Image: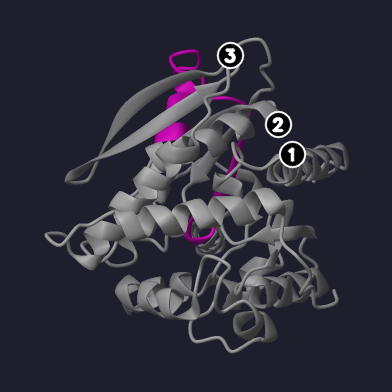
């Protein structure tokens, strides 16, 4: 794909300007950097929040080892599909929560014609990697255990899809790789988890310390900056053992070739664009059933700005349609 340095969507440009004003006008001398970023993320979401009608929302709590994980379900009662999309929010593994991604998850339930389960995983720096990934695996195990009690919640259905935006997309890929590694090794390290039938990855960070053309071209004025990304990677930590592989799941070539049907969408004006597209091309070459899409005139984080931008909504709908088609073709082929 050619380098795209044209204009961004005007609605997104206005949204960025509004976020910049919010940042400048919010004085928080008592908060740490992490606390301030979390607060601003919540304020940004509330500034552009536009609830979709006809979507049922429920919060649930599942018990894991020494902790409790909060998840939120979204379902459109008149449009069941037998699929549940588990969604992992973005925010550099540090910022974001269930509330900041309400708009996106409601649209995913609408566009994906499925129930959506948003996961509030443990965040850095309080919980270094792989704490967040462990929470994702616990949720997948929970969904697997619910197969014996269908109808208890609108979640234990016939197919489990997994996806995320930004850092959440990284976690989704890491979970898929971890599940495939466990299956190949027939290990008991991980408890049985719901099989991932498809992946939806929106502009994922995949490798630290990248110096790509997109990293340089969109370093300022487009939301995410290289400095912020370096800080997020540093806070993620340097795990040991198998977790060190899951931190950079795009390098696990044996598992990448065995991925389920996957849609990876990048944003044209995003510092992470080139590293994600390079991974996608390598995965396709390795034989992975991956569809690469680039969203034109979009910036990093556009998927959480759907209430502000019709063009962004159109791109998320396109990604959902591509995933449903890929999963359907995969199932029809009996794979």
| Residue contact at pointers 1 and 3, CB within 8 angstroms | no
- Provide the residue designation for mark 3: 54
- Nearest the camera: 318 or 25? 25
Q: Residue at x 34, y 64 (%)?
A: 130
Mark earlier in primary sequence (1, 3):
3
Q: Residues within 10 Å of mark 3 (few under 14, many from 20)?
A: few
Question: Picture coordinates of residue 108 (x, y %)?
Answer: 62, 34
Residue 189 at least partly seen: no
Q: Quick check: 296 above or below 252?
A: above
- Residue farthest bottom in this picture: 211
- Provide the residue designation for mark 1: 317
Q: Quick check: 110 above or below 217?
A: above
Q: Quick check: 209 above or below 147?
A: below
Residue 152 at least partly seen: yes
Q: Residue at x 33, y 80 (%)?
A: 238
Question: In the shown orientation, is residue 1 left or right of residue 82?
Answer: right
Magenta part of the chain: 140-168
Q: State the separation of the CA atoms marked 2 and 1.
A: 5 Å
- Provide the residue designation for mark 2: 111
Question: In the shown orientation, is residue 219 left or right of residue 71?
Answer: right
Q: Secondary structure at mark 2?
A: helix
- Nearest the camera: 257 or 268? 268
Q: Secondary structure at mark 1?
A: helix
Question: Where does the N terminus fall, quadrant-wise?
Answer: bottom right
Q: Secondary structure at mark 3?
A: loop
Question: Picture coordinates of residue 101 (x, y %)?
Answer: 47, 41
| Residue contact at pointers 2 and 1, CB within 8 angstroms | yes
């Amino acid at each position: 794909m050619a380098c795209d340095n044209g204009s961004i969507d005007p609605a997104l440009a206005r949204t960025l300007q509004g976020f910049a004003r919010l940042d400048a006008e919010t004085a928080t001398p008592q908060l740490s950097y992490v606390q301030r970023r979390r607060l601003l993320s919540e304020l940004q979401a509330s500034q552009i929040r536009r609830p979709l009608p006809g979507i049922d929302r429920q919060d649930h709590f599942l018990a894991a080892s020494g902790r409790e994980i909060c998840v939120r379900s979204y379902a459109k009662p008149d449009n069941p599909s037998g699929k549940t999309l588990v969604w992992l929010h973005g925010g550099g593994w540090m910022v974001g929560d269930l509330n900041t991604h309400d708009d996106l998850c409601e649209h995913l339930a609408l566009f994906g014609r499925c129930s959506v389960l948003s996961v509030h995983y443990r965040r850095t720096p309080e919980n270094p990697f792989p704490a967040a990934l462990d929470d994702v695996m616990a949720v997948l195990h929970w969904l697997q255990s619910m197969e014996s009690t269908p109808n208890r919640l609108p979640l234990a259905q016939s197919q489990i899809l997994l996806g995320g935006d930004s850092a959440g997309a990284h976690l989704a890929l890491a979970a898929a790789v971890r599940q495939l590694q466990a299956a190949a090794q027939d290990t008991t390290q991980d408890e049985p988890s719901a099989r991932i039938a498809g992946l939806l990855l929106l502009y994922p960070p995949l490798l630290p310390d990248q110096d790509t053309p997109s990293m340089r071209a969109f370093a300022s004025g487009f939301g995410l900056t290289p400095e912020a990304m370096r800080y997020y990677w540093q806070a993620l930590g340097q795990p040991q053992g198998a977790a060190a592989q899951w931190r950079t799941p795009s390098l696990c070539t044996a598992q990448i070739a065995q991925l389920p049907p996957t849609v990876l969408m990048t944003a044209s004006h995003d510092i992470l664009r080139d590293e994600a597209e390079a991974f996608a091309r390598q995965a396709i070459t390795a034989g992975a059933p991956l569809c690469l899409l680039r969203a034109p005139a979009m910036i990093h984080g556009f998927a959480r700005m759907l209430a502000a931008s019709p063009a962004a909504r159109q791109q998320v709908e396109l990604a959902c349609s591509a995933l449903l088609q890929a999963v359907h073709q995969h199932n029809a082929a009996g794979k």
